[in-house]
Image: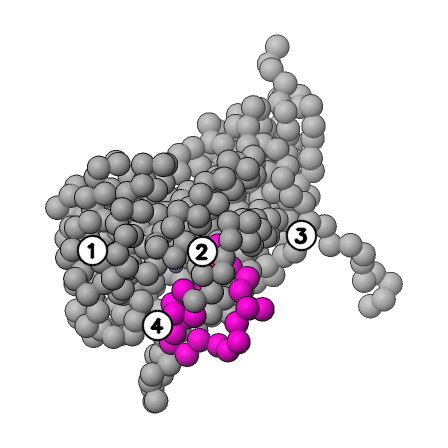
Amino acid sequence: MRALLDLLLTQVRLQKETRLMDVGIRQGMIVYLAPSGGADVPEALMVEQGYEGMLLPGFVEPHIHLEKAYLLSRMEQEAASLQDAIQMTADMKHGFTKEDMAARSMAVIREAVRCGVTHMRCHAEVDPILGLSAFEAAMELKEKVKHALDLQIVVFPQEGISKSPGTAELMEEAMRLGGDVVGGITYQDSDLDAHLQFVFDLAEKYGKPIDLHADFSDNPEQLAISDIASRTIAAGMQGLVSAGHVTSLGSLERGQAVKVAELIKEAGLHIMSLPATDLYINGRGDQEKQRRGLTPICLLREKGVNVVIGVNNVRNPFTPFGKADPLETAWLLAVTAYMGGEADARHLIEMVTGGAARALGIQQYGLQIGAQADMVLFSVPTERDILLDKPEQRTVWKHGVKVAETRVAGSLQGLL
Ligand SMILES: [Zn+2]
């Protein structure tokens, strides 16, 4: 006799599958996958009807700042530039306490989980202002929320490394204490080579991947991404290095941009587009022919680069908008990167699921036998519907256990 399933989810639609499917889960893993209505469906302790809605693997949020979310009520004015946003936030950081950071971070995580996020990579700031307090708050949260969300922590020098003495030692200490990823920021220190050397050396010492904030500008001469790619190849770290923003590439003349995109592909870099922040901050100096300020998504994808999408900031000087819903960010990119077709919708959903999972090196991800049962169920049937509707109604499972369910109450029947 076959072992009982813990959960059988019936009549769901999966990506790249035209038939309705049943999905069986045991001990947090997907162990059964077959067309609905089969004669030999295993018994389950619990059966849930999917009502022909689409089931996706849990969303992966690849780039977010938790401890500086929800700062609007503390701001007296809007930031006028990137350096302005960095300075305003640095000033506010003097008032951050560990409890305050933990509470705002938890608010973001709660919303992300409700939206279907089951994996997240956050950048915890490590510098002489905060010391290790943001990193420690993130480490505590990581443990506290692990039943609902896997959290990776990037050790992030927002204020620069050489520009902010003491940061190098703090980064080293955070990696020793269990940081998952070495961070960096190419536009904060004047000596790019020394900055990258430190980041790559630290990653090698602890055997960890790298995730850099890079080229957040619309100045085509700012091209640290080429140095990052060359170093990645030299270090044999292809596939283990990510770069966020990379917007100056969008201002580069096409022929040169093609060459850089090919180098990015060769280095296996994962490019993280952060459209809400990029669109809000970049292009401001253009008095005419104002640029959008995004990285060239379509060119990079054409060259085979793994491009993913991150929320980045939630309601702070860098981005006084937003919430932790990957679909909101994907929709924004769809509009601004000319991605309006049906195939584009599938690509955008891939960018916040499988593509982001590859960038974060997540194992056993996806909806196949042997994968972890991290899933989000929608009431609509296609990826394009999911992107366009951004439906409120979602059911989220982590390791096969339901962790969030949003139902839309009421009906307009009889009223219309
Ligand atoms: Zn960021």
Query: From where the camera sits, is residue 341 visible?
Result: no
Q: What is the three-letter code of the residue carrying label 3?
A: Gln
In the displayed structure image, the side of residue 351 where residue 206 appears, left or right: left
Q: Nearer the viewer, mark 2 or mark 3?
A: 2
- Residue lying farthest to the right in this orientation: 414
Label 2: few (<14), some (14–19) or many (≥20) C-alpha neighbours in 10 Å: some
Q: Is residue 76 magenta?
A: yes
Callout 3: helix, strand or loop? loop
Q: Nearer the viewer, residue 35 or 133?
A: 133
Callout 2: helix, strand or loop? loop
Residue identifier under label 3: 393
Q: If you read the primary sequence from the N terminus, does the residue marked by circle 3 or circle 1 appear first?
A: 1
Query: CB atoms at circles 4 and 3 under 8 Å apart?
Result: no
Ligand 1 within 8 angstroms of badge 2 C-beta: yes
Residue 5 higher or lower than 415, as above or below? above
Callout 1: helix, strand or loop? helix
Label 1: few (<14), some (14–19) or many (≥20) C-alpha neighbours in 10 Å: many
- Image quadrant in which the C terminus is located: bottom right
Q: If you read the primary sequence from the N terminus, does the residue marked by circle 4 or circle 3 appear first?
A: 4
Residue identifier under label 1: 195
Q: What is the three-letter code of the residue carrying label 2?
A: His
In the displayed structure image, the side of residue 221 where residue 70 appears, left or right: right
Residue identifier under label 4: 83
- Distance of mark 4 from mark 3, alpha carbons? 39 Å
Q: If you read the primary sequence from the N terminus, does the residue marked by circle 4 or circle 1 appear first?
A: 4
The location of residue 20, given as percent across then percent down, is 59, 40
